[in-house]
Amino acid sequence: MNIGIVCYPTFGGSGVVATELGKALAFKGHHVHFITYQQPVRLDRFTENIHFHEVNVSDYPLFDYPPYELVLSSKLVDVVKHEKLDILHVHYAIPHASAAYMAQKILEEEGIRIPFITTLHGTDITLLGKDSSFEPVITFAINQSDGVTAVSESLKADTYEHFNVVREIDVIPNFVCLKGREKAEVDKELKSQLAPNGERLIAHVSNFRKVKRIPDVIEVFERIHQKVPSRLILIGDGPERHEAEATARAKGFGSDLLVLGKLIDTERVLSAMDLFLLPSEFESFGLAALEAMSAGVPVISSNTGGIPEVNENGFSGYLSDVGDVEDMAKNGLKILANDETLSQFKQNAFKQAQKFDINKVLPMYEELYHEVMKIN
């Protein structure tokens, strides 16, 4: 197949999933065309069957905000025509689905029919869905898509709740690329560098926005740190990061906090961790938790949104109510109590991640592509 993928090229979960999906499709022999305003952070352009088409947005004095949706629609028309694409797969409802619909209508005037699939990832529904100014466009774009997927049952339910969607939504979960591994691989050299005195290593990865409840990360770690020698590793960046650093220093454990910032490949660092914290207010799926489990790291998380579909309570980690830092810390201490318990949870975390391996999820997308193309 000749597949066009539209996504945000940043560090966010939707862009990561779209990029990894495209790379897996290319590895299987499909020709994959990424269409976005800059090269996705996890994309190596010099990969067989991978093509990148940059959407150039000019800064005209007439516009306070460059009309990205219109420029993207034009670019989609151009790429579909000249690369002879079979299908478009857009990640995130707006503006990508609405741009794909406009491109589809333009191409129909030239006798070209291009179907498009929309994958809903989370904030396009749970955040924008609560803004009435976006609702008509999102509803229309979803209903006009030739196929729609959501990354969790929770997100599917939220979509039906917030929008007047009249078409079927297929749940195809997010995934990790385990590359045939049968167990998690630990970077022992890095672990010894980060924990020179044998401390437990506790990680958090996010965009450090309010929904991630960064103060809860600090509070949970503080409680664990009081009982068990440990260090907190923060990966990512965002508006709440500096306050987290300041709070850690004020609480007296700043020397046991390491902030790594944005990393393109978190796998190596996660492999050295002993525990992962995800106390979010809401997660449509919890990709960060899944990536931690794929590195053999048990997860302490809230029980909101799609997280319970990823993190199995008492097996790959523990679930707690949003804001219940005391329970989260208690559960974290259970896992870290001794090497035997920790080892068992690490094994369980990797077993849970195997359920979401790309080799199990990719055929679900391929089947949907063929189904949509057959109808169209």
Image: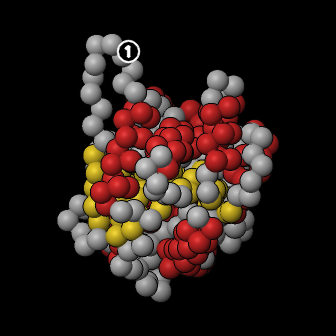
Can you give x and y, in whole percent of width and height, for residue 184 in the image? 45, 78
**Left-right relation of 165 to 179:** right
Work out whether residue 210 can be spotted. Answer: yes
Q: Residue at x 74, y 39 (%)?
A: 163
Quarter that holds the C terminus? bottom right
Where is mark 1, residue-wise?
64
- Way the structure is coloured: secondary structure
The total of numbered circles placed on residues is 1
Closest to the observer: 108 or 250? 108
**Left-right relation of 131 to 37:** right
For residue 199, above or below residue 322: below
Can you give x and y, in whole percent of width and height, for residue 135 in the image? 68, 32
Q: Residue furthest left?
A: 46
For residue 223, above or below residue 26: above
Q: What secondary structure is found at the residue carrying circle 1?
A: loop
Work out whether residue 43 can be spotted. Answer: no
Can you give x and y, in whole percent of width and height, for residue 357 in the image? 52, 75
**Left-right relation of 58 to 312:** left
Callout 1 crowding tier (Cα within 10 Å): few <14, some 14–19, many ≥20: few
For residue 286, above or below residue 72: below
Closest to the observer: 208 or 252? 208
Quarter that holds the N terminus? bottom left
Q: Residue at x 39, y 62 (%)?
A: 85
Closest to the observer: 34 or 198? 34
Can you give x and y, in whole percent of width and height, for residue 120 in the image? 60, 50
The three-letter code of the residue at mark 1 reads Asp
The quarter of the displayed image where residue 306 is located: bottom right
The quarter of the displayed image where residue 56 is located: top left
Q: Residue at x 75, y 46 (%)?
A: 165
